[in-house]
Image: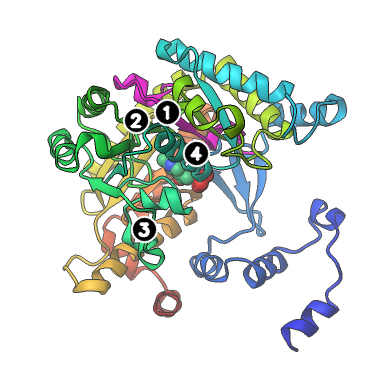
Amino acid sequence: MTALEKIATRPFIRTGDVLAERLSGPDVLELDQLYGNRDLLGGLDILGVAGPFYAVSPWELEDGESKQYINASGYAALPFGDMPPALRGFVKDYLQSSRAVGLPQQSASPWRAALGANLVKLLTSVLPSHADSQVFFSSSGTEAVEGALKFAKAWRPKAKHFISFSGGYHGKTYGSLSVTPNSEYQDVFRPLVPGAVTSPYGDLEALRTLIRRLGPDKVVAVIVEPIQGEAGVRMPPPGFLSGLSALCREHGIVVIADEIQTGLGRTGHWFESAARGMDPDIITLAKPLGGGMSAVGATIVRAKIFQKMLSGLSSKRHSNTFGGNALAMAIGLKSLELLIDQDLPTRSRELGMQGLAWLRQLQHLYPELIQDVRGQGLLLAMQFHPVVGAKLPGALDGAMHEATVLLAVRGLHQSGVMANMSLSNKRTVRFTPALDIPQHTYEELLERVEHFCEAYPRAGKLLSATPPMTLLKLGRLALK
Ligand SMILES: Cc1ncc(COP(=O)(O)O)c(C=O)c1O
């Protein structure tokens, strides 16, 4: 049957069928592969981690065979896990009662107004200099970064360089990709936005030298993650961020703190940049602001910089259709309320200390499996030794690193743990459980990680215990 014939014979899929889970797991996977990112889902399927999964509680998922997993994945975007009752109940109320315009592009909106006001209030509690800051809303992290880069450029129109850091991750649309120095993501798309330059993360002297070489007047902005997430939770050395902030201030260079992964409690603070002595001009937020239910990006900008780009007749110079929509803003407002009411940054900090100590102990017990553990709050990382001890030539070596993380994710999955890969560090998994995960579920999670270590006490075992057919299929996919 041709693709067209297949489509013609398939009935229109109705919402009721999806709601009632009448599409079987294999059907979901097949359709999603057919019409979505086929090779990504194909790879996950080979590893046995493709799902679909359904929430049995906010912190636990189950697959088609009713096997349950504790969710430590979600790429730091699930502050309350999946389908949290408090947010679900609120959305019901919203749908029933709110009369606010859904897409308030040409009018004021109570939900957007409330969320913007609260974000600035929260920020000023740690950085009083932001009292008159303004917020631009969007629908993803990468879009929040695009906004930040444009605000900065409009503020310093004669300058042309954006400095970002090795290992940094800021998103995959053209602007944010240009400041994400990862050749895997960048190379096919060159030329990128001109003027992006990379400096080694954590090296203040190198930054100083680079700014001097480029000419301070020629640098638009420096963009930095207070803790690098996708790089596998890389911590900045003491003094790096505060020094960066002071250096840029000296030259009038805009400082952008990308808090999309670290912000709003994940690392144990509302704003990690502020906790580490920065006073950034622009802060980007996204992931947790949507409460795991909606897409909310926010770019918080000092008033003078905001006004330069969006002033008078130019106030439409940067805009979007869906940013600030009422449902997303309402969910954002409720998410912020839940984070504040439960003081989740403090909880994250405490659980993080317990988790890091546990992982350190595992590293001590399994030194041939675990090379390093890092983390702060509920942003925890475990880095593995390569699955092949010897260094392999060129691309093969890269593939071995990739295989390491894939097989580790597979092994953890078999132990009942969903973990994140790290996009820019191929031998590291990250654990980012919900900030409100119950204590006993968290301890169960750590125990399951321990069971995984017992099952794979050496990195090589991740490879030797994988069925040859699985490896063959993975190899075929990698060579495509
Ligand atoms: C620090 C940081 N910036 C930007 C992004 C991009 O966000 P999104 O995937 O919502 O576009 C991410 C996503 O992982 C991130 O961690």
Instruction: Please tell me whether residue 289 belongs to the stretch shown in magenta.
Output: yes
Q: Are marks 2 and 3 in contact (CB under 8 Å)?
A: no
Q: Quadrant of residue 188?
A: bottom left
Residue 323 versus residue 342 in the image, above or below: below
Quarter of the rendering occupied by the C terminus: bottom left
Secondary structure type for disc 1: strand
Return the x and y of residue 42 as percentages of the image width and height: 54, 70
Mark nearer the N terminus (2 vs 1): 2
Left or right of 398: which side holds 452? Answer: right
Instruction: Please tell me whether residue 480 belongs to the stretch shown in magenta.
Output: no
Residue 32 versus residue 209 in the image, above or below: below
Secondary structure type for disc 4: helix
Return the x and y of residue 414 as percentages of the image width and height: 48, 56
Q: Which mark is residue 405?
A: 3
Query: Within 10 angstroms of label 1, few (less than 14), some, or many (20 or more) residues?
Result: many
Mark nearer the N terminus (4 vs 3): 4
Query: Within 10 angstroms of label 2, few (less than 14), some, or many (20 or more) residues?
Result: many
Left or right of 104: which side holds 77? Answer: left
Q: Which mark is residue 147?
A: 4
Q: Quadrant of residue 270?
A: top left
**Which of 400/147 is in front?**
147
Q: Which mark is residue 290?
A: none
Which amino acid is tagged 3?
Val
Which amino acid is tagged 1?
Ile
Q: Are marks 2 and 1 in contact (CB under 8 Å)?
A: yes
Mark nearer the N terminus (3 vs 1): 1
Which amino acid is tagged 2?
Val
Name the residue that disc number 1 marks: 282
Residue stretch in magenta: 267-293
Name the residue that disc number 2 marks: 254
Return the x and y of residue 128 as percentages of the image width and height: 42, 10
